[in-house]
Every structure is written in structure tokens, then in C-alpha cells.
Image (cartoon, rainbow, N blue to C red):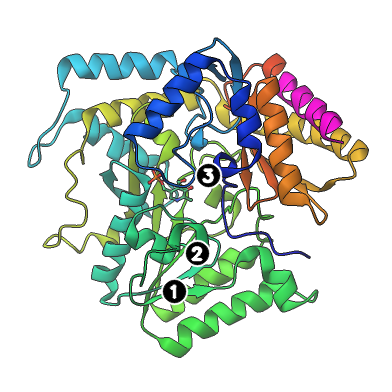
Amino acid sequence: MSAAPDASEGDVNSSPLRARWRAGLSAATRALLDEDERHFLHQSLSTPCLDVIERAEGATLIDVDGRRILDFHGNSVHQLGHGHPAVVAAIKAEMDRLPFSPRRYANRTAIALARRLGEIAPAPLSKCLFAPSGAAAVSIALKLARVATGRHKTLSFWDAFHGANLDTIGVGGEALFRKALGPMAPGAEHLPPLRLVERLFGPDRPFERFADMIDYVLGVQGDVGALIAEPMRWTTVEPAPPGFWPRVRDACTRHGALLIFDEIPSGLARTGTMFGCEQTGATPDILVLGKGLGGGVMPMAAIVADAKLDVAGDTALGHYTHEKSPLGAAAALATLDAIDKEGLIDRARALGARGMAHLARLRAKAPMIAAVRGLGCYFGVEIGGAGAPGLADRLLYACLERGLSFKIGGGTVLTLCPPLTIADEEFDRAFAILEAAFDAVA
Ligand SMILES: Cc1ncc(COP(=O)(O)O)c(C=O)c1O
């Protein structure tokens, strides 16, 4: 098994293929991209950019040249597609009524969202705090674990991603986000990445042995405050087999560490259940949500915690300016309503089956595919062989030229994240584009 580079997202923007792609853009688009570079600091995975977007509707991005692009990337915020009418209407109505809620005041919309999240989260999770980004919500969870346990140490996994703030990259494990930044938070200890468990622990019950190791690491130290994990590490990794997370859950309980599940991309119907953890057999002490919570429009994230953890009344856990954002809460309530009314949990499963059928056919004819996998409506196509990262980049650019955008995970995995509201015809068209790209690259 080859080790993929430590990056959740291949940096296609710095790929040598970008120059050819850029030459195919209109002069107007190139001028705007140049202006973007003049005014924004350069950083990886961002500026320089690929294209300039003018509009976004449903599953489609429309660039300034009028090119339509099926968005199977969407930063994983678009369970409801772009600009869902109910979300937009709820935000507009809230904007007319209460555009901002200053600190020290409660507001009905935020209260309604906190109540709703407490009702739908697995018991005993019931009390919330909100934040304006996923990373900020992870920070709250880490602080709460420190206060509740009196311990500052954490365990997390190499290769994990928990947000791009300095504290969250410390518990994250992706080299791309840590490089050139100096020392990370003290006490942030790392476990081997889930994708290497079989390589490191052998073919005989590897995950059971890995859970034993976690139990040992927690026990031998006795002062770890929290273990934070993505229970579903997206398409770069097969989900851990049944039994693994319950063992980790038991070990945390036994050794007095809190279990934090970061479900920022995997929550809210994406995996075919409302929360991914429902499929793991383990309930965390703190669940972190974000991304699609704001309906793909508002920045909105939350933690939902066991009410027993309401023990930090004297500590500023969040203290974010837009903490109880009525606009974010209105977007989130409209999102949860749409998930229910439009049956998006079932839709995620149906699209999952449809997508896996497409991928099985594609795999049969494309020997460069090492594996295909899916979880609800999220798919991974792993490119194998020595030149896999370069090939993955070429496939991405071949798809972009044909009107399909997605991201590359771990350097070699094409990760496809469609809206759950997408029409069958658009969904099938995206897979036809993918097939055409494989034909072109082969
Ligand atoms: C698993 C996970 N955690 C945390 C974050 C951070 O969320 P945000 O970008 O809203 O800070 C992300 C974003 O990609 C994520 O995928």
C-alpha cells in the first residue's frame, strides 16, 4: 500500500496543469483572476484561483463566461444545493426582523435552533453553543473538555482535519496545514491515521488492536482530557468497521477522557443518516456541526453537548461576535426543515446507490481505478499506481473542462460531494463527464 501525501485536498491551484487551463479562459476572466491575486495574499488551496464564479443555483456554478459547472465540491456545505429558496427566504425574513443580536440578549430564532438540535441529536446530547465557523466550534469543544476534565491533553489522529485555526491544526494531522508554522498546542498527541491501521496492525483484527492501543495510550497517561476524531474520514478512508468506535467510546469513558466527534462535513443527512455517528454505534460527549448547517449560505456551526457538561459558566468558551446569529439560526432551521420535508436522508441513500452503480461500471473499464467507495451521498474514486497524484490532477482538469468540479482528497482520491437536492439527470450527467474524462486521460 502506498502512503498518500498528507493533504485532504490536492492543491490543484499550484498544479502545472493550471497554466494550460488558464490559457483556455477568456481575457475578462484572466483579468479578474489577476486582480484577485493583486488584492489577496497568496495561500495554498486558495489564491491563485481557478476561475471566477458569477452565480450559483442548485447543483450548478455559473462562471463569468457563462460556463455551467456541476458542483460536486461545494466545500461540503451544499446538502441543499446553492441558494435553496426556503433558506434564502428564511434569511431574508430574519434580516428584515432581527439582522443581528448583540451579546447578552437572547433571541427566539437562536433559541429555536438550540432546542431543535438538542431534540434531534442522539441522547444525551442536548445543550448547544453556536459559532461562526467549524474551526471556532472545534475550539469551543476543546476548551469545554479542558474545563470539564481539568486536563489539557488531547488525542487525535494523524491525517485528520479539524479546521485551519492555530489550535485546531494542532489537533489536526495534515502536514499541509502545519508546515512553516512552528510549535503547535502543547499536549496535542497523535495516533496513527485510520487509513494505515491495516498496514500498521496487520491483517488479524487490526481495528480491534488499534482500539486496544488507544485504550493503552489513554490509560498509561491517565491525564488526557479529550479524544477528537472525524468518525467518518471522508472518502480518503473506508469507515472503521463496526465495533471500533464503541471500543474507543468505552476506553474514553474508562479513562475519564471526553469523546468529541467532528461531524462538520458528515452531519446533516450527507451519509444517509442525520448524523454520521448514528452509523458508528458510539455517541460522543460533544458533537460538532458546521458547513451545511448554514444551508450553504450562512457561516454557521455548533456544538451539541451532554447536558452534564454545562460546567463552564465562569469561562468564555466561545464569546464570538456573531455567536447567537439570528440569520445563521434562521438558515439552519430552514435547512433542518428542508431535510425533513424533502426526505433528504432517504435521498442521500438513493443517490448513494445510484452513484455506486455508476462507479462500479466505471471501475470495470478503467484499470487506473484502485478502489471506489461511498457513504450515503459522498463518493471516493481512488487512483492507483505510481503516477496516481498526477493522474488525479489530470482527471480533475479534464472534468473541469467538461463542466464538473470536485476535490482531490489525499492526493489520489477523487472525492465527489453532490447536493442531495440534485436532479437524477444532472447527477447522471456528472458521472458521464467523469467517464469521458477517464476516456480522455487514458
Ligand atoms: C472535518 C472538518 N472539521 C473542521 C472543519 C473546519 O470548518 P470551517 O472551515 O468552517 O472552519 C472542516 C472544514 O473543511 C472539516 O472538514
For disc 3, the neighbor class at 10 Å (few under 14, some 14 to 19, many from 20) is many
Residue 198 — which label?
none
Q: Is mark 3 within 8 Å of ligand 1?
A: yes
Inspect the magenta stretch and tell me whether residue 439 lies in it: yes
| Residue 26 appears in the figure | yes
| Residue labelled with disc 2 | 173
Nearer the N terminus, badge 1 or badge 3?
1
Residue 354 lies, in percent from the top left, at 76, 29
Q: Earlier in the sequence, mark 3 or mark 2?
A: 2
Query: Which residue is depicted at the point 23% across and 59% down?
Result: 310
Q: Does residue 11 lie above or below 327 as drawn? A: below
Quadrant for residue 290, please give it: top left
Residue at image location 69% in from the left, 55% down from the top: 238
Helix, strand or loop for disc 2: loop
What residue type is disc 3 on? Ser
The x and y percentages for residue 89 are 33, 13
Which element is circle 3 on?
Answer: loop
Say if mark 1 contacts mark 3, CB within 8 Å.
Answer: no
User: Residue under circle 3?
Assistant: 266
> Which secondary structure dominates the residues rendered in magenta?
helix
* 91 with respect to 355 (left or right): left
Please identify the quarter of the rendering in which residue 97 is found: top left
Mark 2 Cβ inside 8 Å of ligand 1: no
**In contact (CB < 8 Å): disc 3 and disc 2:** no
Looking at this view, is 256 or 80 the one in front? 80
As drawn, 373 above or below 357: below
Residue, disc 1: 253
Cα separation between marks 3 and 2: 18 Å
Residue flagged by tag 2: what amino acid is it?
Gly
- Asked if the magenta segment contains residue 66, the reply would be no
Relative to 227, residue 414 above or below: above
**Magenta part of the chain:** 428-442
